[in-house]
Image: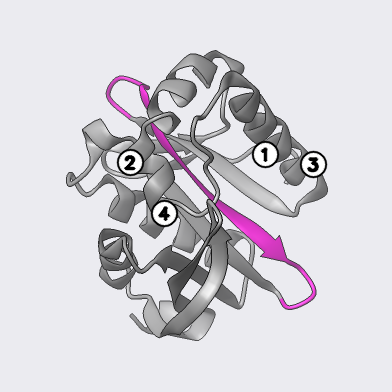
Amino acid sequence: MEKFPQLFTERLSLEKIRVQDIPIIVEYAGNEKIAKNTLNLPHPYEEKHAVFWINKANEGFENKTQFTFGIRLKSTEDFIGGIGLILNQAFNRAELGYWIAEPFWNKGYATEAVAAILEFGFDELNLNKILATHLVENPASGKVMINNGMIKEGELIEHIRKDGVYKSVVQYRLTKKEFENK
């Protein structure tokens, strides 16, 4: 895969994150509710974080270790969030992560974007398994995973440390066989 892929759903396009997106990424990711509900977004979120994210996404694509997409509304091309897969090539699996800006919550965009990424991961990257975790305090993220046929594997107690506090996460999975049979 030489060129960064573009994925399309009914209402969304998933594509390479652009440098021009930095101000809106900082605005949306800077929302404390976003940081509170995600594993890896710091608060406060500054321009340097957005630059780092874009550089890491570009490097990951070049190395084929990561596919990170900006989520855009197809009708306006407005940036509304991010989604991606971090590959573990040794085990032919990937970890899925995503976030949606608060003005776009509860509209089904995360579910739609995750469906596209799962299809990409299994059909284009030929992965055997995709897993995802969410903070126990963010059950809405688990609902997105369930809506996409992902299966709860378990709760990992005090599995991560965020802002100096140990937090539990719930892990979901989908294997290629499960994806093909859903």
Q: CA distance from mark 2 to mark 3?
A: 32 Å
Q: Earlier in the sequence, mark 4 or mark 3?
A: 3
Labels 4 and 2: the sequence-earlier one: 2
Residue assigned mark 1: 57
**Residue at image x 64%, y 35%?**
53
Q: Taking 173 as reference, is 137 above or below it?
A: above
Residue 151 magenta: no
Mark 4 lies on residue: 116
Q: Amino acid at mark 2?
A: Lys
- Residue 45 is situated, as x and y percent measured from the top left of the image, at 52, 29
Residue type marked 1: Ala
Around disc 3, counting alpha carbons within 10 Å, would you say few (fewer than 14), some (14 to 19), or many (20 or more)?
some
| Residue 88 belongs to magenta span | yes
Is 38 in front, or is 89?
38
Residue 114, horizontal then vertical, whole percent? 39, 56
Q: Which residue is mark 2?
A: 33
Pointer 1 or 3: first along the chain: 1
Q: CA distance from mark 4 to mark 2?
A: 25 Å
